[in-house]
Amino acid sequence: MTERALHIGVDGRELLGQPTGVGRYLREILREWTGDAAWPHRLSIVVPAPPPDDLAAALGPRTSWIVAASPTSGTLWEQWHLPRALRRARTDVLLASAYTAPVFCPCPFVVVIYDVSYFAHPEWFGAREGLRRRWLTRAAARRASAVATISAFSAAEIERWIGVPAAQILLAPPGVPVPAAPRAPADAGTREPLVLFVGSLFTRRHIPDLISGFARAAAHVPGARLVLAGDNRTSPRIDPHTLAGAAGVGERVDWRAYVDDGERDRLYRSARVFAFLSDYEGFAMTPMEALAHGVAPVLLDTAVAREVYGDAARYVSAEPASIGPALTSLLTDEPARQAIVDAGRARLAQFSWTRSSAVLRAALERAGTRR
C-alpha cells in the first residue's frame, strides 16, 4: 500500500436516481472505504446533480461531493463536465466506475468494465448506441492504468474483444449483499409460492420464455405468482402484462418498473424461487442477493453462471419446457429447494466486498503514485 495520501475522484453518476447493478456495486465499494477507520485518502465523488440526503449520510463526512451540474448524465457529461471537475479539484486519480472514462482525463484512472455484451452481441444494441459504447469502452480500457472486472468470464471477454492483456485485468467481484433489515431465520413455511425476477428487462434475459415457463408451473402450483422488478429495456419492446395475458396468467404476473431497497428486501423474503435467464452477464448480482435471502435461483446454463454459482442454482435452457418443470420442482419440493439454499451458503462465503474494495484501492494507489 502507498504511504502517500491521494485525492481520489469517483465518477458517481450511477449512484443517483434509481440505481441498478453498477450503482449498487459502487455504493458498496464506497461503503467499505469510508467505513475503514484507517482509510488514508481523500474521496471526491463527482455527480451531475446533488446526491440524496440518505446517500450522503450513508457514506459519511469523509466523502466530499462535487456537483458538476448538467441536465444529463450521459456521454456529454462524462466527456466534458466530469474532466473539468476533476481538473478543478486536482484529483490524483479517478475511479471510472461505469465502463468508460473521459478521453482527455486530467489524471490517471482505473476503469471498471462489468461485461462487453456490446462487443460480443452487437445485435442487441442500436447501431449508434453500440458504436458509441464500443468506441468509448475500448478507448478507456486501452488508456487505463488498470481494468477491473467482476468475473473470470468477463476478464477473458475483455482480453478477447478489446485486447487488454490478462496481466492488466483485475478481478473485483461483488460481495455478499447485506439485507436492508436484519434477517430472521429462514422459515420455508412463511414463504409464498412466489417466483421473483429482479433486474432490468433486457431481450437477452428471456422474459417471454420466463413468463411462458411460469405459466406451465402455475398450472400445477395453486396460488403461484411471478413478480418482475426492473425497468423495461427490451428491444424490440415487449409488454410483460400482454405476454402474461396471452399465456393465461395475467392475474398472476406483476411487473414493477422499480422497487426501492426496502421493497426489494420484502420480495426476497417472501419468494421461494428466483429466476434469472440471461444469455450474457458479467456476473449477475441479483441471484446472489436471492441466495443471501434464502431464495433458490433458476439460471440459464451459461459459463459465467456456472463459474459464479456452481451447485447453488438449478440450471435450465431457454425453453418453457425446461423452465416450467424447474420452477414447479422448487416451488413444491422443499428438500430440493433447501439443498440449493444450503449450497448457496458456501458460494456466498467466497465473495467479499472487503476483498474487492482492497483490489480497487491498490490499483488506484499504484496509478496515483506513478503520476
Image: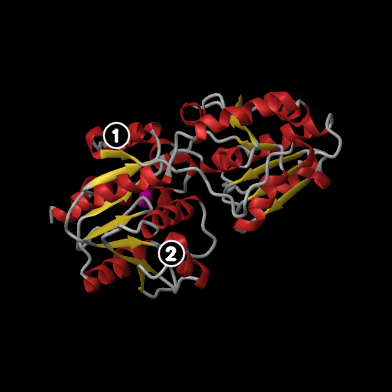
Viewer-nearest of discs 2 and 1: 2
Q: At which x and y percent is residue 120?
A: 40, 36
| Residue at the spot 56% in from the left edge and 45% down from the top edge | 202
- Residue 59's disc is 2
Q: Secondary structure at mark 2?
A: helix
Q: Is residue 135 visible?
A: no
Q: Work out whether residue 180 or residue 204 is closer to the camera in this orientation and state it.
A: 180
Task: Name the amino acid type tagged 2.
Answer: Leu
Residue stretch in magenta: 131-135
| Residue sitting farthest toward the front | 37
Residue kind at label 1, given as amino acid type:
Glu
Q: Is residue 359 left or right of residue 319?
A: left
Provide residue 244's location: percent of width, then percent of height.
76, 43
Image height of 207 relative to 300, above or below = below
Task: Residue 129: tell me if it is visible.
Answer: yes
Residue highlighted by disc 1: 159
Furthest toward the right, the residue is: 222
Relative vertical location of residue 145 with respect to residue 221 in this rendering, above or below: below
Label 1: few (<14), some (14–19) or many (≥20) C-alpha neighbours in 10 Å:
some
User: Residue 351 location in percent, x, y?
Assistant: 44, 38
